[in-house]
Amino acid sequence: MKGSLLITAFFVLGVVLGLTKLLPLGELSQDMSFYALAGLLFCVGMSIGSDFRAFSNLKKLNFRLLFLPLMTIIGSLSGAAFSSVFIHGRSVVDCMAVGSGMAYYSLSSVFITQYKGAELGAVALLANIIRELGTLLLAPLLVKIFGNLAPISSGGATTMDTTLPVITRYSGKNFVVLSIYHGFICDFSVPFLVTLLCTI
């Protein structure tokens, strides 16, 4: 949770610096966001490729639970599409692009900013931070009302790192392998889904 608050603080600091023009970057800002995106994709590839446990732990899962990430992705995109009914000025595809971030705010917000502009990128950043914070804060309630799988679906791509301790505590240690697998698949899907939805 501390990490999410720190990211939010840096986001607010960036907005303030941008509004006050204390750092007049001009055209450099677009180049910087591209290099930041390239760096993030490199780090995603490294983290996925170096986690050998994610592949070996798949063998221990119940076959039906292998579909949980797919259900999370479908639910996230459906919920985002439904939210477009209440949001004026943004298309269904724009809302789905934000929803496809799966709480991976650092990567999805940069992608969306590149393709759709800073306004929707900021919305994506905040929406995905809120999703992660919601999972961290509401995990016990989610388990009580919806069952042990609820915090895993709610956490999206974060279930193999930042929200894993909370999921382990409230859903149980039996769900650690599932949580890592779920986060791995959701994490992997984000660049493809966001790019696809932003270019439609």
Image (spheres, rainbow, N blue to C red):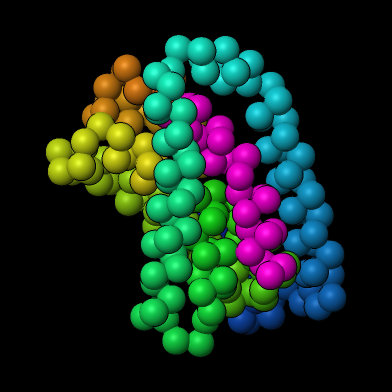
State whether residue 170 is above or below residue 98: above
- State the extent of the magenta-drawn residues as a range: 179-200
- Measuring from the top left, give residue 37's x and y in whole percent: 74, 53
User: Secondary structure of the magenta portion, mostly?
Assistant: helix
State whether residue 80 is above or below residue 144: below
| Residue 18 seen in this snapshot | yes
For the point 77% across and 77% down, the residue is 24
- Measuring from the top left, give residue 5's x and y in whole percent: 43, 52
- Measuring from the top left, give residue 27's x and y in whole percent: 84, 75
- Measuring from the top left, give residue 109's x and y in whole percent: 60, 61
Q: Is residue 115 magenta?
A: no
Q: Is residue 186 magenta?
A: yes
- Outermost residue, front side: 64
State whether residue 93 is above or below residue 6: below
For the point 51% across and 74% down, the residue is 92
For the point 63% across and 16% down, the residue is 52
Quarter of the image that includes the C terminus: bottom right
Residue 193 appears left or right of 127: right
Quarter of the image that includes the N terminus: top left
For the point 69% across and 21% down, the residue is 50
Residue 85 appears left or right of 14: left
| Residue 13 seen in this snapshot | no
- Place residue 136 in its image quadrant: top left
Front residue of 85 and 14: 85
- Place residue 122 in its image quadrant: bottom right
Front residue of 41 and 178: 178
